[in-house]
Image (cartoon, helix red, strand yellow):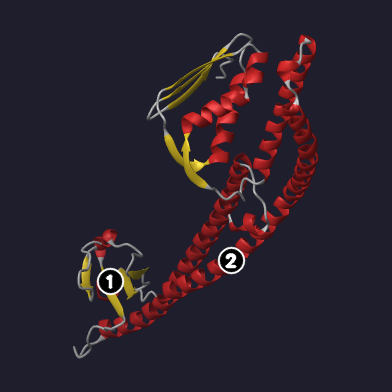
Amino acid sequence: MSVLKSLDIDLPQSEKKTLYRFLSLYVFFTIVILGLTVSLYYTLQKELAISQRTIVLDEYANGFLIALEELHNDKTDTLLYPKDKKFKTSLYGKDYKLIYSTLKNPKNLLTEVTYTNNKSIRYITNPEKYYLNTQYIIVEITDDKEWLSETMRTIVIYSSIFFIFMIVVGYFLLKLFLKPMRDALHLLDIFIKDTTHELNTPVSTIMTNIELIDKDSIKDKFLLKSINRIDIGAKTISNIYDDLTYLMLNNKIISNNQDINLKQIIQQRVEYFSLLTNMKKIKVVTNLDADAVLNIDNKKLSKLIDNILSNAIKYNKINGSIYIELDANRLSIKDTGKAFL
């Protein structure tokens, strides 16, 4: 995430999942609130538009009744049915049957007429006096959708402002949420760096001096056993030091890939852990048939094999075994230790 990078925070995968869930929940509720608000606003604007047009239709209907009364009382047969380009009318008489209509496709029965649809708005009135045997008058106007265009324009503008505002609020909430974690990670980083720095010198000194000891010339078995234990302890601490160093530089290490003979690397690492395996009387059985060559970073490959062998030794039983098999397509490392389900 760009926010995490800008804050120089590298979170573990589990914490990243928690953070992603928080952000997903935040975005979800933001969208829900926005959707409900938009839906409510749209409904209110639609009802307002229908109400305004109903008033217009009612005013036209009142004027239409006056014209209809004049037409009803006309004795000269010179008056015509009142028509308007904007308004359409239908007259229904007894039993809701159609008398006359200016609609293109009028309904024959009043019971089939709806008040509104996607294209028009209809208004029904029941006059007090029945002119021309008319008991019901329907006035219809075509919906020009001006209210819809204006409503959608308003929704887009204010929704964008609201969404941007929520993103800004979310960004500051995220910074506030990450601050304790950032401080804790910063303190942990300082501790690891200081510990690693202080650990390197004594470990290197111990291992260097152990290598200078001629073990073959030592006759005292107890002394030789003590030196071997010191060697094992030093290598264990050295392995921990390598883990801390790799952890610290994991995102900054530049890989130096080269052709590596996997068989030789395995033999070297098995030899490196030989004292540890001898201490627990663990038998290492190797079956390295092929000289597999990988183009990979030597340190990273060694660290991978070291971690596997270290766990195989650590969780193995006394007098246990480790089986290492290598062929042209597969490397297999098995042990007789604990099985974790």
In the displayed structure, does residue 198 sit left or right of residue 146?
right
Image: 21 above or below 104: above
Tell me the residue that label 2 is attached to: 164
Q: Estimate how packed mark 2 is, as few (under 14), some (14 to 19) or many (20 or more) residues with alpha carbons within 10 Å.
A: few
Q: Nearer the viewer, residue 34 or 277?
A: 277
Give the amino acid at mark 1.
Thr
Q: Position of residue 120 (x, y in %)?
A: 33, 70
In the displayed structure, does residue 64 sit left or right of residue 236?
left
Q: Position of residue 37 (x, y in %)?
A: 55, 60
Q: Nearer the viewer, residue 224 or 39?
A: 224
Q: Position of residue 68 (x, y in %)?
A: 30, 81
Please count the marks in the image.
2
* Quadrant for the C terminus in the image: top right
Q: Residue at x 55, y 30 (%)?
A: 305
Q: Nearer the viewer, residue 281 or 9?
A: 281
Tell me the residue that label 1 is attached to: 134
* Quadrant for the N terminus in the image: bottom right
Disc on res. 111: none
Residue 289 lies in quadrant: top left
Q: For the residue labelled by badge 2, is the local secondary structure a helix, a strand or a loop?
A: helix
Image: 113 above or below 245: below
